[in-house]
Each structure stands twice: as structure tokens, then as C-alpha cells.
Amino acid sequence: MDLPLTPSQTIGPFFAHCLPWPDGPHVVAEGTPGAFWLRGRVLDEDGDPVPDALVETWQADPDGRFAHPDDPRGAGVEFRGFGRCPTDAAGHWAILTVRPGRVPDPAGRQQAPHLDLSVFARGLLDRVVTRIYLPDEPANAQDPVLAGIDQARRGTLIAVAAEDGFRFDVRLRGPGETVFFSV
């Protein structure tokens, strides 16, 4: 007996359809003192762009405070600490933000300023999470998380200077794969 082929189905994720919102890429408003663009691309293991990913950032304000109920100090008035941006056809994303402040780790040691970054994309059953450190930050040398990463791979966590801010590409797999954390 010959059975007919099962018709193909397109199933999610449909990140670009439902999750973005107009203020998503703006952690701070245009014109905020010290604001800069953090731009990058999401790439697959072959270095090809991932056109339908979603990038989220979470960070402390310049004083090291979070806009979150678990931080009793609260963040600055016009600071939400969270940004979300879908990738375009070439895998590009961009977030307008400010330099984060230092925050303590669970042991009370001061961490270098960084942004947490999550990527949601096709083929991933769960998001992948990494950190973005800024290249001109002296505290990077004493950061307990960076110190725990093999020196040959630390560069995958450090943004590079760009004309209007910084650039950070995410490589999901393959040579130069970004370091991801289990959270």
C-alpha cells in the first residue's frame, strides 16, 4: 500500500510577527546623554545571517541599579533596562542604550559593566544567553565571569568600538561560536 506524503507545515517561531513593539530597541530615549547604539548580527554556524531571530538585552543603569522589583534602589526615571529587537533579512539588530554600571555577583564581588543578551531563533528549543562587555572597560580585567572563560574564547564576549557605539555579533555555532551561559 502506498500512502500519500504528509503535506509540509510551517510552524513557528514567528518572532517578527508578535513579539516586537515600537519602543523595543530603545532602552533609553533618543537624545539621552551618553546614549549609544549597540549593533550586531546573528549568524549561524556557516557565518550566514539568521533573518528571523529576536535579540533581547537586560542591563543595569549607569549607577548599577536595575529597573526591577528585586532591586529596592530602582533605576533612573527614564531607564527601563530592557531592549528587544528582531533581526532583519541580513541578521542585523540594534539597541539604543547607555553604559551600564557595575553590579555585585552573588558572592558580593563587583562585576565589570556588561549587558545580558538573549537570542531566540529558529532551530533553538530555548533561548541562548550571553554577555556583552565593552572593550574600553578597565574593570574587565577583574571580572569574575570573564576570568572563568578560556582566554582564547573571551573575545566572543567583548564588543568592538563602532562609529556610533559598539558592535557585537552573535555566532550561534561553529568556529568563533559565542560563549553562552546556562541560566
Image (tube, helix red, strand yellow):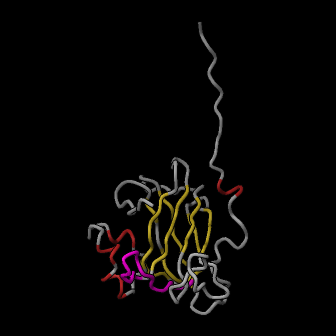
Please identify the dominant SS of the magenta region: loop
Where residue 57 sits: x, y (%)?
A: 55, 71
Where residue 146 sits: x, y (%)?
A: 33, 74
128 relative position to 7: left or right: left
- Placement of 182 over or under 28, stated as above or below: above
Of all residues shown, which one is farthest toward the bottom? 33
Q: Quadrant of residue 154?
A: bottom left
| Residue 164 visible within the image | no
- Placement of 11 over or under 176, stated as above or below: above
| Residue 35 visible within the image | yes
Where residue 174 sits: x, y (%)?
A: 37, 54
Magenta residue span: 98-112
**Where's the N terminus, which quadrant?**
top right
Where residue 31 sits: x, y (%)?
A: 66, 89
Of all residues shown, which one is farthest toward the left? 151
Image point (55%, 84%), residue name: 61
**Along the line of sight, which residue is nearer the eye, 117 or 73?**
73
110 relative position to 2: left or right: left
